[in-house]
Image: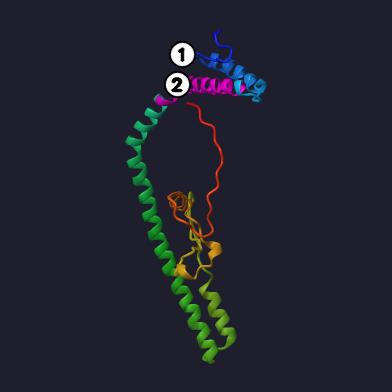
């Protein structure tokens, strides 16, 4: 047992998982029973927090016995296989692009035929029922192609493109809080920003 009653663990040595679990339970019990109502009790809290940090180091050391070798295996696997995985993804993307270009071209031609029939009908060059029949013969957009084992689908995805930032209302702007903090703490006044103080506890 540690000589100091506030000491959960000693700084030297090692701890296994069973010991860590036991000491963690002791730690929580100590925290639950700790009161800070006087200066002497405040000093004791400083020692307790420092000792908890020591326990945390043991936890990290024990954990790293497993995580470090595992991370080395992961890093080696990534070094070996990531280039080939990237080649697969690039090849897939290239084929998707080619398929999309072709299917888009086919759809544009189909729409052009529909528009031509509609214009002829508007001008009275063909009867309305003839226009309907010809439009039906063209058919609808071909959105997918299937084989026995796979399927290609063409989907229309809406994307947002900002064409003029100056016209965007302020409610959609995002403030760069890191920059604001740096500038404000440097003593420069920023409208709408004020510096407020809060206390934090540090143990050395």
Q: Nearer the viewer, residue 111 or 68?
A: 68
Q: Is residue 91 above or below residue 11?
A: below
- Return the mark for residue 190: none
64 part of magenta stretch: yes
Q: Is residue 147 above or below residue 64?
A: below
- Please tell me how crowded label 2 is: few (under 14), some (14-19), or many (20+) other residues with Cα within 10 Å: some
Q: How many marks?
A: 2
Mostly what secondary structure, the magenta segment? Answer: helix
50 part of magenta stretch: yes
Q: Which residue is mark 2?
A: 61
Q: Which residue is mark 1?
A: 14
Q: Secondary structure at mark 1?
A: loop
Residue at 54% x, 17% y: name it. Answer: 20
Q: Quadrant of residue 197?
A: top right
Q: Tell me, what colour scheme is on the image?
A: rainbow
CB-based contact (under 8 Å), mark 1 and mark 2: yes
Q: Is residue 88 left or right of residue 55?
A: left
Q: Is residue 3 above or below residue 59?
A: above
Q: Secondary structure at mark 2?
A: helix
Instruction: Residue 164: give x, y in percent of width and height.
Output: 45, 70
Residue at 51% x, 87% y: name it. Answer: 120
Residue sticking out furthest to the front: 39
Q: Could you give the CA–CA distance between mark 1 and mark 2, rounded to whole angstroms?
A: 8 Å
Instruction: Residue 200: give x, y in percent of width and height.
Output: 54, 35
Instruction: Residue 55: give x, y in percent of width and height.
Output: 51, 20
State which region is magenta.
41-68
Q: Nearer the viewer, residue 15 or 79?
A: 15
Instruction: Residue 58: give x, y in percent of width and height.
Output: 48, 19
Q: Earlier in the sequence, mark 1 or mark 2?
A: 1
Quadrant showing the N terminus: top right
Residue at 50% x, 57% y: name it. Answer: 174
């Amino acid at each position: 047992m540690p000589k100091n009653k506030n000491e959960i663990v000693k700084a030297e040595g090692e701890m296994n998982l069973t010991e860590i679990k036991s000491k963690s339970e002791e730690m929580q019990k100590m925290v639950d029973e700790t009161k800070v109502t006087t200066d002497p009790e405040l000093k004791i809290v400083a020692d307790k927090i420092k000792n908890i940090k020591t326990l945390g180091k043991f936890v990290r050391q024990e954990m790293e016995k497993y995580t470090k070798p595992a991370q080395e295996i992961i890093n080696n696997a990534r070094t070996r296989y990531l280039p080939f995985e990237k080649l697969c993804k690039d090849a897939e993307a290239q084929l998707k692009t080619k398929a999309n270009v072709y299917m888009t071209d086919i759809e544009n031609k189909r729409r052009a035929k529909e528009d031509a029939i509609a214009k002829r009908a508007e001008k009275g060059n063909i009867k309305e029922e003839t226009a309907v029949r010809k439009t039906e013969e063209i058919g609808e957009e071909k959105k997918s192609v299937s084989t026995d084992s796979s399927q290609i689908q063409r989907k229309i995805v809406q994307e947002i493109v900002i064409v003029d930032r100056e016209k965007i209302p302020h409610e959609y702007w995002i403030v760069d809080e890191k920059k604001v903090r740096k500038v404000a703490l440097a003593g420069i006044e920023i409208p709408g920003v004020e510096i407020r103080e809060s206390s934090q506890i540090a143990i050395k």
